[in-house]
Image (cartoon, rainbow, N blue to C red):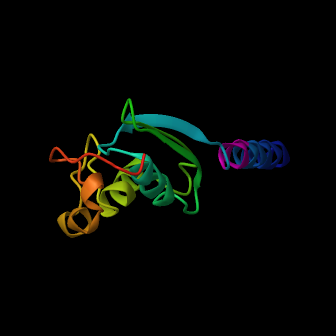
Amino acid sequence: MKKHIKIIALLFIVIASVVDASAAGKTRKDSFKVSGNCGMCKANIEGSLKVNGVEAAMWNPDTKNLQVKYDPAIISLEQIHHLVSAAGYDTDTEKADSAAYTKLEKCCQYRGKNKCDHD
């Protein structure tokens, strides 16, 4: 009887390990709004997410929508919002770092009525 219990316990451990291993490496897709104006903003926003755990990031200047594909085992959505705000851009949950915002090109400072002349 003890032998059967040990075998069953071992099977549970193996199954739990397989389930845990299959969960690792799964990517997730999310999207959220990010303020910005132009192609330069696009490069900055997407560039801020060239980090471990983010597989892809695409920001649309017309819709202000950022689509991200990432591994939540490596990076959280909250961390992604923080990286974008640290680059100077407001997200729908986090306001941009003020020092980073003021360092943006004038046309990228989206809180005013600035127009881009490089698009």
Extent of the magenta region: 19-24
Residue 70 in view (yes/no): no
Q: Which quarter shows the N terminus?
A: top right
Q: Which quarter shows the C terminus?
A: top left
Q: Residue at x 48, y 35 (%)?
A: 30
Please identify the residue farthest to the left as the structure is shown. Answer: 112
Left/right of residue 16 with respect to residue 40 in the rendered view: right
Placement of 114 over or under 105, stated as above or below: above
Please identify the residue farthest to the front as the structure is shown. Answer: 117
Q: Residue at x 40, y 38 (%)?
A: 61
Q: Quadrant of residue 82?
A: bottom left
Q: Residue at x 27, y 40 (%)?
A: 92
Q: Quadrant of residue 19?
A: top right
Q: Where residue 41 appears, x then y in whole percent?
A: 39, 52
Left/right of residue 13 with respect to residue 66 in the rendered view: right
Q: Where residue 72 appears, x then y in whole percent?
A: 53, 48
Q: Where residue 52 appears, x then y in whole percent?
A: 58, 62
Q: Nearer the viewer, residue 104 or 35?
A: 104
Residue 117 in view (yes/no): yes
Q: Residue at x 78, y 41 (%)?
A: 8
Task: Tell me the chief SS of the magenta region.
Answer: helix
The reply to whether the magenta stretch includes residue 22 is yes
Placement of 61 over or under 72, stated as above or below: above
